[in-house]
Image: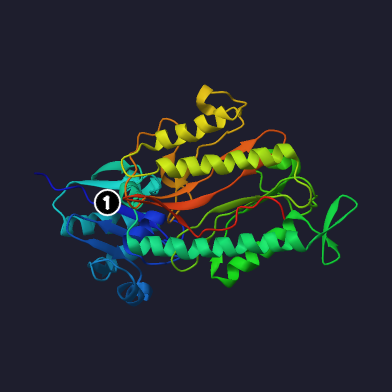
Amino acid sequence: MSEKAPLILHGNSYDNADLYYATNFLISENVLCIVTSEKTILVTSEMEKGRAREESKVDEVLTAKDIGLKEELDELEKEERKVRIIEKVVEVHTSSDRIQVGKDFPVGVYRELKNDVKVTEGPFTEQRAVKDEEEIEKIKEVQSAASEAILAAKKVLQDSEVREGKLFYEDKVLTQGRVKKIILHSLLENNCSCKELIVSSGNESSTPHKTGTEEKVLEPNTPIIVDVFPFNKNSRYHGDMTRTFVKGEVPEKVDDMHKAVLEAQRRALEVLKPGTKASDVDKAVCQLLEDKGYSTRLDDSSEAEFKHSTGHGIGLEVHERPRVGKGVDYELRQGNVLAVEPGLYNEVGVRVEDLVVVKENGPEVIKQTDRSLQV
């Protein structure tokens, strides 16, 4: 049997989730990681060598000096150095004449490699889709931070006053941007951050990923969608939670939409178990909403009131495999962690999202948080 082609990863582990998954080492400068059938090797600068050996989970940490290339590399350009290091490490540590690289691998380096190179789509996609207990605990930690941030936003809405059709908080108009700052402050207190978050309201809420603006003032008697998907600065794992609020009187139509979305989420949880196809979960949610008179993607309508998939995997990235949507044949496995987020959108929008762990006997909701609509 021929030896499996080694996998070459390149980049910094703050931005490259696969690199962090392979090394468990946070570094802001670009490094090379070579994953062979026998070991995982990390090639760093001399300055980072000691820290990498202490903090990473790789089998071996090398530098250009360690592999006998320091003098040679001094004469080469930056991209040529990477090529030479890869070729040398592969030559010494494997007998394969082929290598694999990720789709985000530098094109310039790829072109210069003498090896037979195969570009692979998401080298750790399958492994990352199933979380072990340590990963699940990391996700639970950041989901708790997401819950606190959501509740902080809710508390501001509760404490706000309605004046002339606008919300005021501490005698100042309450804007989407101000709520975002409160959310980000809460996350920071839990060592978390969020590259983007959603605070949309009124007619804007009818667009699922409308993020909101700094200046828009929140209004009563209309939906306010708050969607927080933070990551922990140390573990790098993500959480994801969405709640829909109405300050003041809840329009009957919005109340009906919210009840339908909650029931759709409960329906998803009823069918989420190992062996179930992700598409069947999505279909069950769509069917329930259709039965309640809402249009969904079941009929391929571009005007569907349920516009997006039922959910997605989550981990080192906020969207990972498996996607819980139409046509996804992935069979759910114990250890999948999924965001379940049914929503309805017409003149306004309503969405509720929670994370669940797929377990042998059904799903476990991570961090039960109040789903009440009215504040």
Q: Outermost residue, right direction?
A: 164
**Left or right: 356 as drawn, with respect to 165:** left
**Left or right: 116 as drawn, with respect to 161:** left
Q: Residue at the spot x=24%, y=70% of the render?
A: 66
185 vs 281: above or below: below
Helix, strand or loop for disc 1 = strand
**Left or right: 314 as drawn, with respect to 35:** right
Screen quadrant of the C terminus: bottom right
Screen quadrant of the N terminus: top left
**Residue bearing the label numbered 1:** 7
Decide which of 225, 48 is in the foreground and name it.
225
Residue 303 picture location, percent across and down: 62, 26
111 vs 302: above or below: below
Residue 182 shows in the view: yes
Disc 1 packing (10 Å; few <14; some 14–19; many ≥20)? many
Residue 39 picture location, percent across and down: 20, 61
Q: Residue at the spot x=50%, y=37% of the render?
A: 309
| Residue 80 location, quadrant | bottom left
Decide which of 13, 237 is in the foreground and name it.
237
